[in-house]
Image: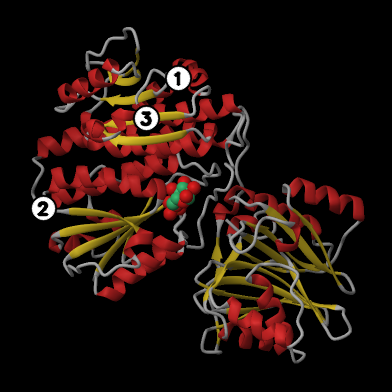
Amino acid sequence: MCGIVGAVTGRNIVPVLMQGLQRLEYRGYDSCGIAVHDQGLFRARSIARVSELQAQIDASGFAGNSGIAHTRWATHGGPVIDNAHPHFSLDRQGDRRIALVHNGIIENYELIRTELKSLGYLFESQTDTEVIAHLINHLYDGDLLHAVEKAVKRLTGAFAIAVICKSEPHRMVGARLGCPLVAGLGHGENFLASDAMALSGATDQIIYLEEGDLVDVRQTSIRVVDRNGISVNRKIDTVSATAGPAELAPFRHYMQKEIFEQPGVLADTLIGSENLDAGMFGAGASEIFKQINAIRILACGSSYYAGMTAKYWIESLVGIPVSVEVASEYRYREPAVNPHALVLAISQSGETADTLAALKYAHQLGHRHSLAICNVGVSALVREAELSFLTRAGIEIGVASTKAFTTQLAALLILGLTLAKLRGHLTPEQQRLHVDALRHLPAAICRILELEPQIMAWASLFARKENALFLGRGLHYPIALEGALKLKETSYIHAEAYPAGELKHGPLALVTEDMPVVTIAPNNSLLGKLKSNMQEVRARGGQLYVFADADSMVAPSDGMHVIQLPEHHGLLSPILHVVPLQLLAYHTALARGTDIDKPRNLAKSVTVE
Ligand code: G6P
């Protein structure tokens, strides 16, 4: 979603800001822009890619010692040039006084806009952001920090901002509430960014600003002021993860690269899990895990489907009830509170606004115990949760989650097995079997990846379709949902997933010979019932594309296409079965020529609700 990068330096900062924008591209955006101080405020904006903005800059010789830059994902007002950030506010002489970039949503912007309009401020855009620029200008008394401090008190909603001012050339002020913002310390230069990765190559010394913080950035100093107006010392972290996305070669897209990274990142995520020791989840986890009598999972997108899979695992392994809820729904309802439940928030980024708000809401409601499963150790979600487990997927660039999803599944299976062991539901023999199977997971994924050529052949057929149905049962129903999500977000083919037993309650009406029906057919207790469901599809002329286990005894025949997965341990089956679905989506999207790593309208980290 939106990204911010800014700097105060003694050199031409444009190349660093542009590199920062390139590093933020993966988050998803529809316009971008940059403003610099060069004896006045100047800006360039584009509704195309960062590379187009770069071309404008190369042509104009645009330069400056301090500046701010932004990638925008439209919320208020469409992706047109007037709505792209940075936004300016002019002084009485008509000179540009304030330039500002903003992530988040200002909920009371209409009220402030009306007020500022009546004071004579002219609005060029439909954004909520422009009101902040004018408000700061209106409150400006010669000190940018004071003006920002007063302005943010008037704002409701969520924001991270970076502001520069014509009359204070060597200064930049930032503020955050509800959206991430980091300050970066350099040598004789300092930075702001919404994501430490944007500062890769510039600095690895990062301050994660806290809720309500204001930050006064100058060339040789950074001063942080908390929400009460008190100067505070925030911890400086050395962030090695600021290394940007690795080389793409030999892959064509990050999605493909990330699918193929799964054996390695799963092996990394499994490190230290051999004894199923509750300590992996943080100090005190053992006591908490013994006390809880239920689990409430909160998440969005693919993380939500990982949570749905965990419900099947944990209820069968541990015997405690697990409820899974979309975070954006939970945060606005009045749920029954069980203080003995563990609230489990799942998120790749740890930044998703709804998941973070849902976890905070659960705490406010009186939930005492919480656990975050997250891919980013320094995220707001991990800071908010009592316990945490980090997946080790590495930076995921493709908007469509792949390796983050499978590492979440691995983490959730480890959680289920750890709870089962701690609560006496596993015999030593069962424990040995499961841990052994987990150890073989990376190798099993490698064997699945070898199916790519067969899946490519299917993808060329799928690329000509506009609809697809995905069926799964039990543990594999969430995997069918994830498969349908992958296909729709990358190839723009309408795809729906159903638990196969529901087929007769509606979706069967859609089945014709033009409807590919992807079926996940593991060899488990539901296989016989699934085969009956498959017959129902065949009887209506539907074309079945079946991912079957080696021993599922599903043979190819007319209208029944089958790819056999290598043998594997049953409990791991969802982690293995999702990989061919990722490849099917990737190759179908490739055949349709879509922007695979940055699907239209979507963002990697949804930092606004
Ligand atoms: C966006 C991404 C998805 C992701 C979801 C939740 O929609 O495109 O891939 O699953 O957000 O993100 P999180 O970072 O909380 O897992």
Res 348 visible? no
What is the quadrant of residue 213 in the picture?
bottom right
Q: The residue tagged with tag 3: helix, strand or loop?
A: strand
Q: Nearer the viewer, residue 586 or 535?
A: 535
Task: Report whether residue 66 is seen.
Answer: yes
In which quadrant of the rendered image does the N terminus lie? bottom right
Query: Residue 106, image x and y in percent?
Result: 56, 73
* Residue appearing at x 34%, y 36% in the figure: 497
- Out of 115 and 151, give the one closest to the viewer: 115
118 lies above or below 51: below
For residue 423, the mark is 2
Between the C-alphas of marks 3 and 1, the distance is: 17 Å
Mark 1 or mark 3, which is nearer the start of the sequence?
Answer: 1
Give the residue number, with chain letter if any, for mark 3.
Answer: 469
Q: Position of residue 97 (x, y in %)?
A: 81, 79
Q: Which amino acid does the dot numbered 1 rest on?
A: Ile
| Callout 3–callout 1 Cβ contact below 8 Å | no
Foreground label between 3 and 1 = 3
Give above or below for 222 relative to 205: below
Task: Mark 1: give few (<14), some (14-19) or many (20+) Cα within 10 Å.
Answer: many
Q: Earlier in the sequence, mark 3 or mark 2?
A: 2
Mark 1 vs 2, N-terminal side: 2
- Disc 3 and disc 2: Cα gap in Å? 39 Å
**98 and 397: which is toward the camera:** 98
- Residue 141: x percent and y percent? 75, 92
> Circle 2 sits in a helix, a strand or a loop, which is it?
loop
Q: Which residue is mark 1?
A: 455
